[in-house]
Image: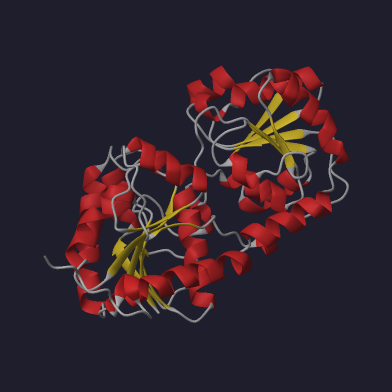
Amino acid sequence: MRFHLLACPNAQTTKEYLLCGFAALTIRFSNMLAKHGHTVFLYASEENDAQCTELVPVLSKMDIQTLLNGTPYQSVWFHPTPLLWETQCGRIISAIAQRKHPGDFILSIGGSAHLPVFEKFHADCFGVEYSIGYLGTFSQFRVFESHFHRAFIQGVYGNNIGHFFDEVIPVPFEAEKFPFTLQPGNYLAYVGRITENKGVALACEVAEAVGMPLKIIGHGKDEDIANFVGRGAEFLGPLPDGQRNALIAGARAVLCPTLYMEPFNCVAVEAQLCGTPVISTPWGGFTETIEHGVSGFRCSMFADFVKACKDARALDRTAIRNRAARLYSTEAIYPQYLRYFERISQLRGDGFYAGFPRPQSKTS
């Protein structure tokens, strides 16, 4: 199969930019497709660590710096910097026009910011939003990161009619990159953005109540760090990937007390791939990624969080890691995507009724 994979324009597809979850997922997805022999055109910037058939640089590093105009790359949303997206879309359209074949797939996780690209090529290419964990979804072919988020989006848009070409496939992870230990340290960890809605202040309160050190890895505004990182917590900043994963693996548990309806939460899965239990709130994607009492705990009361930190010692870290690899490794996820893309490809032939005679329409 042939794929045109669109990176988001705020970051390079390299390990130095992994604070952007969209860049990290783009790299993993490109690696997964290329590993299985597919043709992958990656439309990104000039620096790249992802495996692909051809890197198509559509924005230089200088272009990105100029268009961001001082906004940190990891803080860019899809709407505050329209010129960044408009410039990238225009160049992507020109580049795809030179490379596309009928029946190719165009893949994006840029939401409606990449709509112009999909509109340009909808007549002969399949435009797929391949991992939706955001609100600005628009395409005919959509893959959601969780069943929760698919239902949530249906509610947001007030749509109670199903769609046969929506699918739910979890985010894939390269399981071999996550270390494992049976002898964790005596500390808790929080990994993520330092914002109120991510629940970092609650994580600090829980750790203080339990009497365990809390190591915080993440990034945020100085005022948010000052406001939400409580006493007794050690703020380590955005550590490099290897150090970050080692610290997660060595934690007694990872706290993910997100206050909003988290579509998926990659940190929760990354922790489990290290064999580390996850302690979270009881809604959103956590309801699917955390098996309560087995790979962690979903908590509804402050006392639940405190008890979970103590009970985490008794959980089987080997079982946690094995479950996560079975459900979320690229080896587990790739066949699901392959089936989805094969199903979509049939629409160029008999479509929905592939393999069966098309019913005759009734006439009066």
Could one spot residue 331 in this view of the protein? yes
Query: In the rendered image, is residue 177 in sight?
Result: no
Residue at the outermost front position = 364
Image quadrant occupied by the N terminus: bottom left
Figure coloring = secondary structure
Between residues 14 and 109, which one lies in front from this camera angle? 109
Q: Position of residue 59 (x, y in %)?
A: 29, 59
Q: Position of residue 7 (x, y in %)?
A: 37, 59
Dividing the picture into quarters, in which one does residue 303 lie?
A: top right
* Above or below for 75 versus 106: above
- Residue 188 placed where, x, y %? 75, 33
- Identify the residue at image location x=65%, y=58%: 327
The furthest residue to the left: 364
| Camera-nearest residue between 177 and 257 | 257
Q: Is residue 112 left or right of residue 8?
A: left
In the rendered view, tell whether residue 242 sits above or below residue 46. Answer: above
Q: Position of residue 86 (x, y in %)?
A: 21, 51
Residue under the image location 20 percent in, 73 percent down? 97
Q: Is residue 230 left or right of residue 136?
A: right
Q: Is residue 54 left or right of residue 323?
A: left
The quarter of the image holding the C terminus is: bottom left
Number of numbered callouts drawn: 0
**Residue depicted at 82% across the width and 21% down the height:** 211
Q: Residue at x 33, y 49 (%)?
A: 111
Q: Is residue 74 above or below residue 361?
A: above
Residue 325 occupies quadrant: bottom right
Q: Tell me: residue 230, above or below residue 61.
A: above
Left or right: 216 as drawn, with respect to 172: right
